[in-house]
Image (spheres, rainbow, N blue to C red):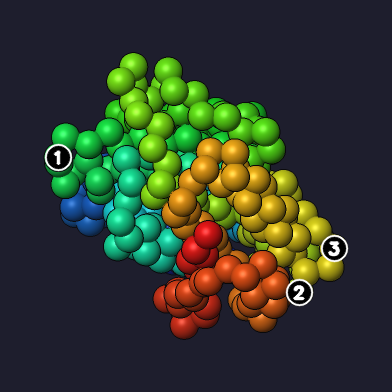
Amino acid sequence: MKKQEIINFWIKLWISQNNILKVLELVTGLDKSQLFLSNNIDDKFIWKIEKHFARLVSWEPIEYILNKAEFFWFDFYVDSRVLVPRNDTEIMVDQVLESSVPDLYIDIWTWSSCIPISILKNLLTEGGNFLKKAYAIDISKDALEVAKINIKRHNLEKNIKLINWNLLDNFEFDTSFLSPNWDLNLDNLIITANLPYIKNWDFKNMDEETINFEPDLALYWWEKTGFELYEKLIYQIFELQSIYNIESLVLFIEIGFDQKEIAIEFLEKQNLKFEFFKDNQDIDRCVKIYF
């Protein structure tokens, strides 16, 4: 079948040419240059191509169909057990890397582990005789299975410890994971968290791909503001800081487009200093909080 005929037909059904070409590459095994030079698609691939396009027509994210998402210039395995990594979240990685990054940090509700993997890959590239390790915590066992795939793919099995836990409730540092000679000095601890921040079933500001296909556990959590889970986490951080006598701790979080004032009000009540950073759409998306 003519490649252009396939493209023309599915464009009429509101599938972008970019996604069409991605599916053709996936099914045929051709790379971009080979596909560009090909005028015909072997008929043996047509049924599979149509199956994938039917999923796209139903608004399923292309990342789930390809089992691949790009984040911070790295490729990650994804499926419907985890959120699709967003470009807006990359601002958090940028800000962490611009900070004084300690040898150890914690990522909470890690999902595909795209955040800790991106941070550690950049830190390890810089070299140095530093112990770069992270705890990656998630409430979902299914999500941790996806995270495990990505950690292995990026050769970080010795650098990231996965934990099935709810936030930091009764969290303890496992020094056996760190090093036999590790001195548990946490005076410069960093925590990253991309928690669910959408008010329960607040569909009006969401697209169909997200509503129908991404895991509810990653999206909805509270009814009033959507910021309640961050409030719970911050109280737990106060407790962790007290238990381990941590002098300096910085938390990076991602918030919704309408939560800046809510965040400010809560953080000021806790006497915490903070900074906001904008995403690619000029929305205050990342908050750096100083404890």
Asked if residue 86 is positioned above or below residue 204 in the image, the reply reads above
Which amino acid, by three-letter code, is at mark 1? Gly
The alpha-carbon separation of the residues under discs 2 and 3 comes to 14 Å
Using residue 39 as the reference point, say whether residue 255 is left or right of it.
Answer: right
The alpha-carbon separation of the residues under discs 1 and 3 comes to 46 Å
Q: Residue furthest right?
A: 223
Asked if residue 246 is positioned above or below residue 56 in the image, the reply reads above
Query: Residue at the spot x=62%, y=70% of the render?
Result: 271
- For label 1, count other residues whose C-alpha is less than 10 Å away and answer few (under 14), some (14-19) or many (20+): few
At numbered mark 2, what does the secondary structure look like: helix, strand or loop? Answer: helix
Q: Are marks 1 and 2 in contact (CB under 8 Å)?
A: no
Q: Mark 2 = which residue?
A: 204
Image coords of residue 57 (percent x, y): 61, 58
Using residue 134 as the reference point, say whether residue 100 is left or right of it.
Answer: left
Q: Mark 3 = which residue?
A: 223
- Earlier sequence position, callout 1 versus callout 3: 1
Q: Is residue 261 visible?
A: yes
Which amino acid, by three-letter code, is at mark 3? Glu
Residue placed most toward the observer, 61 or 99: 99
Image coords of residue 33 (percent x, y): 18, 52
The alpha-carbon separation of the residues under discs 1 and 2 comes to 48 Å
Image coords of residue 144 (percent x, y): 56, 31
Using residue 222 as the reference point, say whether residue 85 is left or right of it.
Answer: left
- Earlier sequence position, callout 2 versus callout 3: 2
Residue placed most toward the observer, 130 or 50: 130
At numbered mark 1, what does the secondary structure look like: helix, strand or loop? Answer: loop
Which amino acid, by three-letter code, is at mark 2? Lys
- The disc at residue 128 is 1
Query: Closer to the camera: disc 1 or disc 2?
Result: 1
Q: Are marks 1 and 3 in contact (CB under 8 Å)?
A: no
- For label 3, count other residues whose C-alpha is less than 10 Å away and answer few (under 14), some (14-19) or many (20+): few
